Each structure stands twice: as C-alpha cells, then as structure tokens.
Image (spheres, rainbow, N blue to C red):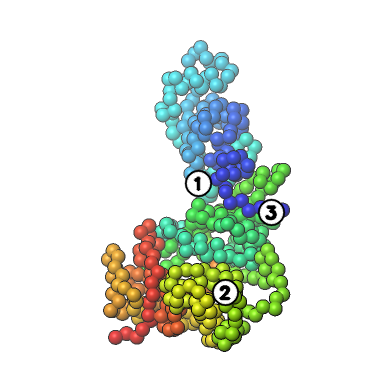
Amino acid sequence: MKIIINEWRFLISEGLITEEKYQDAIKKLKAGDKLEYTDDKGGKLTFEVIFNDSGQVYLKNLDSGVYKNNYFFITVSDLSKNDLTFKTINVPKNLPDNLKNEKKDSIKLAEILKTFPTSSWKKSTFKNISKLSMAGDDIDIEKPDAEDEKFKDYVKVNDINPFLDELKGLKTGNVYRLTLSNGGIIDLNLIDNKNDSLFFEYSDAKGPAKAYDELINAELMLDVNSNSVQQMVSSLTDEENVESVYNITFKKIISVQGDDNNRAYKKILIKNIIDIDLVSSSNKKEDKKEEPTDEPHIEDMSDEEIDDMTPEDITSMVLSNPTFKAAFLSKPGFWKKLVGGKPKGILAAKDILKKFNFYDNARGDKKEKDLVVDFFKNNEEYFIQLLDKTFTRDDITLDITKKYKVKAKKRTNVNGGITVFLYGSGFMFKINTIYGDTRNEFRATLIIDYNTEDEYRENRTIRVTDAY
C-alpha cells in the first residue's frame, strides 16, 4: 500500500516520520555517540559526544593526530554545503592541575567552560567533507557541482507559482523526463497526484544522470511547494530570451516500520534541470472506470438538438459537469464568453452547451486552446489593444485608445500543452482563452515586473489588431 503524506511538518513534529538530514540528526545525538567526518581525499576525523544542548554539541576528538586531546564545539547551523565550521580548545594545556587525572570528560568540560567560554575557543573549518556519519547513520552532504558554474549568474525566481501550477497539472500514469544541463536524463512514472503531492516510481536514467544511483528502484515523493522546488532564470530584464533552470528535492522512502505512517525518508536533490517533458501517457482513467451510458455526449449534439431538449435535461447536463456548473452558477461577466452575460436560468444553461459546441466542433473539431495556439506564430510581431479600460500601474500605462507592439513566444508546458505569451515593452500577456465569438479577441493575464518580488498580475481582455 502506498501513501501520500501531505502534512509533512505535522508528521515530523509528532514523531510519526523521520528524515535523514543534518539539522535533525545533530539534535538527537546523545553522550557517547560517535561522529566520523571523511574528506574528499579519504582523511577521517572521529569524535565522541560529551554533551548536547539541542544541537549545540561538545565533542572529544578520538584521533591520535594534531587534534588529540582537543574538545570541539559545533552547532546545528555550522554545516554549509560540504564545509563544517567549528571551535576547538586543547584540554591539557588549559585544564587546572588538580583535574589532570580526571577521567570524566563532562567534569573537565565544565571546568574548562568556567574559564574559557566557547566564544574564546579557536575557530577553524573542515573543508570538502564527502561523508558524514552520526551515531551510525550516514547523513547527506550537499556537494558542489561543476555544473553549478554554468548558472552562477542566474537569478533566483521568488514567485514560482506558475511553474508549481504546471507541476500540479501532471497526470497520473504518465512518464515524465527530466533533462539535466549535463545531458543526463531521468524518467519518472507518476503514480499519484493528490493534494499538491506527487508520487513517482523510478523508470530509467541515462548518461551523467546515472550518478543519481539512489534513484534506482526508488519510490519518490515531491511536495509541490517553494521549499522543494527552486527556479533560476538567466535574466530578469530580457523578456525574449530568458532561460530557466530548476533544482527539485524529492523524498525517497528508505524504510517502513509497522504501518505506512511510520516511515523514514531521505532527501534527493536533483540539480540543474533544464527541461521536463512528457515521454509517454496512459489512457487509463484515474480511480474510476467510465461506465457505458445511453445519454448523448455534449460534443456530438447540434444546436437544434439542444433546443429540443427539455429544461430538466439541459439543467441536469450542465450541473453534472463541474466546469459548466461553475459557469451556470456564477455572476454574469465572470464566464461571459460562455453565458454571454445572460442571467442564471435555462437560457443561460442552453447557451453554455451551444458555446461549448462552438469552440469544440464548429471549427474543425479543434479545442479552444488549440485555436489560441494556431492563431499566433512563434517569434512573430503583432499589435494589441487593451479593451474595457486603461491600465496604469507603476511606470506602465496601456491606453485603450492606443495599440502596442508585442512579440509572440510559445512555451511547451510539462504536461505537453503549449502556452502563448506576448512580450511588450515592460509588460507581457499570457493568453488564456478566446473571448466571445470574435477570433482576434482574447482573455489574457497581464503581467508586469515578472520574475521579481513585485510581480503583478491582472486578467484583462485584449484585441489583436493591425498597426496604424
């Protein structure tokens, strides 16, 4: 039985699950526990815990080298990537004569601290740690990657909600391919998508991605939030040639004891992802089978057939579809392209069905989203005019009496769909839907200050028009 765990912080706080990471493991160390640090050249340093105060740990060195007879002090925040900062003091050199033969390190430590608080201890750093063992458990070390140099000038995106929304739209049963900047490929099969958590099974890895050997035969969970997903872009100002790179942290199940809630997880950070593509899709229905029915399908009906339906049948058909129901129950204007501003009632419901046919059948069986994509050509320039009212915010003004030049950019989403963006001078529009019965009018999201903390979005109606 598989389980999707959404309340991650709650489960950790209640002790229902554990997670192998430095910040948690160091707080659990007890007197007598052993630590071992190994650097990238194979050198080792070993210690024993004297005292632990919620992650402020006092250690005794167990080696016979330069640190013999030294006490060490480390805290929960001292590990940065693969370097560990610490404080140390030589015990025999600073211990009173009457305690030279004392066997208990706790007594000697207390005496040392009376005269020499940790603020006076010598500071230093363990560099390039490749392995860290704490109380018998191996702890992940975030190691520098040569690929990081390619993106050292990239800027972190603060609002990654658009990308998170794409991840939330991934379909169960599909296989998705992560392409890394070094040419590596990782294929993951999406088993479940529920409540902003994605559950994957490892499928394959090729090229340099084989270095992620911990993924083999793994079951992985991804919490779709800004804590697990990081996006960086090549520019915040060049709206036409921006490239993105992503770092995504998955959680691998490493043990199960008792019930499914009592699990241990290990974080696996997959870095420098430059693309996510749909590799193969499943036609299986999620969680239910489609039962045969004699009821007509909306997309097969003509306007005349809709007019011949009884009010009860029309209302039932509309209310049984979540999208149509939302349109039917909403106020006029919010779903204006569907209900045409009509009040609630059977006329509105009938118009909903006819509008659905207009977009899905009347134009060569193409969905409305396809019509949007087909209308625009990639990298072509267009002129747009804002409808309804003039927009003014910060230094951007779009007057409804004027036309503005834009360039179309088509972006392939992780679910295989295509989104059209129109880039102007200091603003851009994300095209959402065709507006009404006019092909060159669209509902779109106006975005300014994009990829910054001050990003602003507003849904508006625009018309694509010829230049003056």
Q: Which residue is mark 1?
A: 81
- Disc 2 is placed on an element classified as helix
Q: Residues within 10 Å of mark 1 (few under 14, many from 20)?
A: some
User: In this view of the protein, can residue 22 be seen by the observer?
Assistant: yes
Looking at the picture, how far across and down is residue 196, in whole percent?
A: 56, 57
- Disc 1 is placed on an element classified as loop
Between discs 3 and 2, the one toward the N terminus: 3
Marks 1 and 2 close (CB-CB < 8 Å): no
| Residue 211 figure quarter | bottom right
Between discs 1 and 3, the one toward the N terminus: 3
What residue type is disc 1 on?
Lys
Give the answer, above or below, for where 382 lies relative to 28.
below
- The label number, if any, that marks residue 315 in the structure image: 2
What residue type is disc 2 on?
Thr
Q: Which residue is mark 3?
A: 2
Outermost top residue: 98
Q: Separation of disc 1 and disc 2 at Cα? A: 60 Å
In this rendering, the label closer to the viewer, 1 or 2: 2
Q: Separation of disc 3 and disc 2 at Cα? A: 39 Å
Marks 1 and 3 close (CB-CB < 8 Å): no
Residue drawn at point x = 57 percent, y = 48 percent: 7
| Residue 242 figure quarter | bottom left
| Residue 105 figure quarter | top right
Q: Separation of disc 1 and disc 3 at Cα? A: 32 Å
